[in-house]
Amino acid sequence: MIDPVTLWTVIIGLGVGSFALRFAFTGLVGNRPMPAWLLRHLRYTAVAILPALVAPQVVWPGATDGQMDAPRLMAALATVAIGLATKNVFAAIIGGAVTLYALLYLLG
Amino acid sequence: MAITTIKSAYWKGFRDGAPFLLVVGPFALLFGVLAIEAGLNVFETMAFSIVVIAGAAQFTALQLMDENAPTVIVLASALAVNLRMAMYSASLTPYIGAAPLWQRALAAYFTVDQSYACSVAQYEKEPDMTVPERMAYFAGAVSPVCPMWYVFTLVGALIGAQIPDGWALDFALPITFLALVTPMLRTPAHVIAALVAIVASLVTAGVPYSLGLILSGVAGMVAGAQAEVWLEARKGGQQ
């Protein structure tokens, strides 16, 4: 259970922080150029943080108490493979979900 | 077709933004469902989606709160996920920086992956658009996407409690994130950033307070930026 104080701190803090990030340049910087090194690092935030968030979940899922789980591992690999092949977010999600359910059914 | 009026710019944006509904709808639905499963009520879930309006950051915050990570870590990690918004903002600035402040503030709130992607593509394609036309296009691109973010969050929150454990929804988020990230791996530097971040996240999984995520994210960003410099230098050297 999530503590309500924590929850509202996060909702408001994240709301204000996200707006600040979105407004930082359009609102405040105007037409001045950004330093190249900063843009270069910002370019890789999403592709670094998002996989880092899910990788431990893929290898040691909470639902199996941290035991490596073949259906979940294969589903993750299928999602990545389909995503790379099709460049289509939707196809990758469906492919991953089908793999997960098929293996849970076959092995469960 | 050249855009000649404000109104046609709006509808052009609307048509370009509409296909993103297929991505945003299910993503919002999933957030609603997982938020309810994590113990939030419908009001809290809706407040989350309306105040923050950033899917990946919301999921990140939700998961870390569910793992009882300290509030500071929850905020830092979720904001790190949203750092790309600062990049979007930076790249929109040359096009809409001259608009009135209230319009720029509204546009900032509605700067999401989809509205950014459409708008920048359009602005680059038709550099002769006036600033009001650009804002109209942006508003058009946002119109089909953002209201549906709220609506589908609500639908997910309302049906969430009825979904049985056997559906393995714990794994909906990893699959969704992997599916979102994979098409972003456009260059070798992006791939290197992702691989370094993944390895770092597994190595640092035991670091307390979920600090491993921040460390891994920074490692991935630095690796990506360095790889870009190195690859460009090598390319330049060959010419």
Image (cartoon, grey):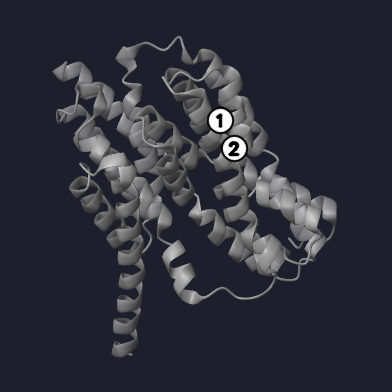
B171 left or right of B184 in image:
left
- Residue occupied by mark 1: A8
Chain of residue at mark 1: A
Is residue B165 rendered to the left or right of residue B117?
left
Q: Please, what is the three-letter code of the amino acid marked with disc 1?
A: Trp
Separation of residues labelled 1 and 2 (CA atoms): 6 Å
Residue name at image x 20 percent, y 41 percent: B206
The answer to whether dots 1 and 2 both sit on one chain is yes
- Left or right of B13 in this view: B117: left
The residue carrying pointer 2 sits among few (fewer than 14), some (14 to 19) or many (20 or more) residues within 10 Å by Cα, namely some
Q: Residue at x 47, y 41 (%)?
A: B56
Eyeballing the image, is A60 above or below A21? above
Find residue A83 and report its horizontal and vertical position in percent. Answer: 35, 45
Secondary structure state at the residue bearing disc 2: helix
- 1 and 2 marks in contact (CB < 8 Å): yes
Of residue B10 and residue B38, the one placed in the foreground of this image is: B38
Q: Choose between B42 and B137: the one closer to the eye.
A: B42
Q: Viewed as shown, does residue A13 lie left or right of B5?
A: left
Residue marked by disc 2: A12
The three-letter amino acid code for the residue at tag 2 is: Ile
Residue A16 in the image: x percent, y percent?
61, 45
B166 to B97, vertically: above or below? above
Tag 1 secondary structure:
helix
Residue B51 appears at what percent x and percent y?
Answer: 63, 36
Above or below, comparing residue B42 to residue B183 in the picture: above
Along the line of sight, which residue is nearer the eye, B239 or A63?
A63
Residue B193 visible in the current orientation: yes
At a point 54% along the width and 17% down the height, the residue shown is B41
For residue A88, say whether it is visible: no
Q: How many marks?
A: 2
Work out which quarter of the rendered image holds the N terminus of chain A and state it: top left
Residue at 56% across, 30% down? A8
